[in-house]
Amino acid sequence: MPRTSTLQLRGTGIVAGYRRATVVHDVDVALHAGRVTALIGPNGSGKSTLLRSLAHLHEPESGRVELGDGTAVGDLPGRDLATRLTLLSQSRSVPGGVSVREVVEYGRHPHRGRWGGGDPDGAVVVDRVMGMCGVTELADRPVDTLSGGQLQRVWLASCLAQDTAVLLLDEPTTFLDLRYQVELLDTVRDLADHHDIAIGIVLHDLDQAAAIADDVVLLVDGRVDAAGPPADVLTSARLSAAYGIQVDVHVDPSTGHVRTRAVARHHTRPTPLQENP
């Protein structure tokens, strides 16, 4: 049975869009301490817009986003909000001439005084989050010499340096090779399990969502089609309807996780491997 956990962020009746086009329609979502909530759905279903609305980087047309104590995120000054939640967006510009440590230290900005002082815990936090993200050995490297996977982990460390209770991640595995995808998602799971952070993450890979998430929210045309544990949401009928293609679903007996397979026209059913005589 899932353990009870503290509500950290709630969006209620969120309606959001761009100019005259509404993208998100009356969506409710809640993030709890120590739990990972994955937002999934076809392209254009409103996942990133919803995440940006929760982070107050996109102003909803209506609805309310509030922290666990009932404070509306829109009522908090930017510096105060940045000590409560953080968002790792899809892309960030790579600064030139700065080291990994300096980029991670950027995350301490909300905790410093107006003139950059008053952060006695900053160095300890920076060292801790670099270790959590596996970039300690890169501390003195210029960030513009890093691989994409290394850089993504540096940006994650910078977000964690804000020392918030809520972490929002927008497609963090995009453009990463298999190893770095696995390592980053392992780190995300550790943040929930061992640091009690409430995590909302947009993912395209359904198997990744099934493996990492406690809760899955399936968005279709900007509306919540289903929400709940992965096994309840990731069904063949529901996914096939949402994505407009046949999606087979089974449970991996070795892990207990849901596995999915989109069936293309030229796919054939796999045949058992034959042992060499």
Image (cartoon, grey):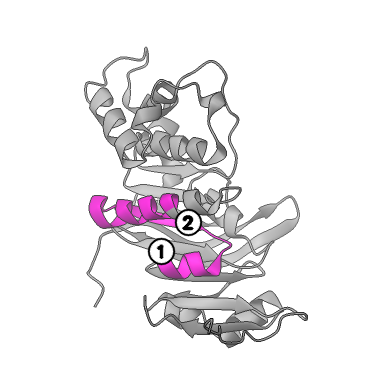
Residue shown at the point (44%, 75%) measured from the top left: 230
Q: What stretch is highlighted in magenta?
A: 183-212
Q: In this view, does 257 lie above or below 76?
A: below
In the image, 25 versus 115, the foreground residue is 115
Q: What amino acid is labelled 2 in the image?
A: Ile
Contact between labelled residues 2 and 1, with CB atoms less than 8 Å apart? yes
Which disc is residue 204 wearing?
Answer: none
Can the viewer see residue 67? no
Q: Is residue 179 above or below residue 236?
A: above
Can the viewer see residue 156? yes
In the image, 272 versus 230, the foreground residue is 272
Q: Does the magenta stretch include residue 114?
A: no
Magenta stretch: dominant secondary structure: helix
Q: Is residue 188 magenta?
A: yes
Q: What amino acid is labelled 1 in the image?
A: Ile
Which disc is residue 201 wearing?
Answer: 2
- Whole-percent x and y of residue 41? 60, 68
Q: What element carries label 2?
A: strand
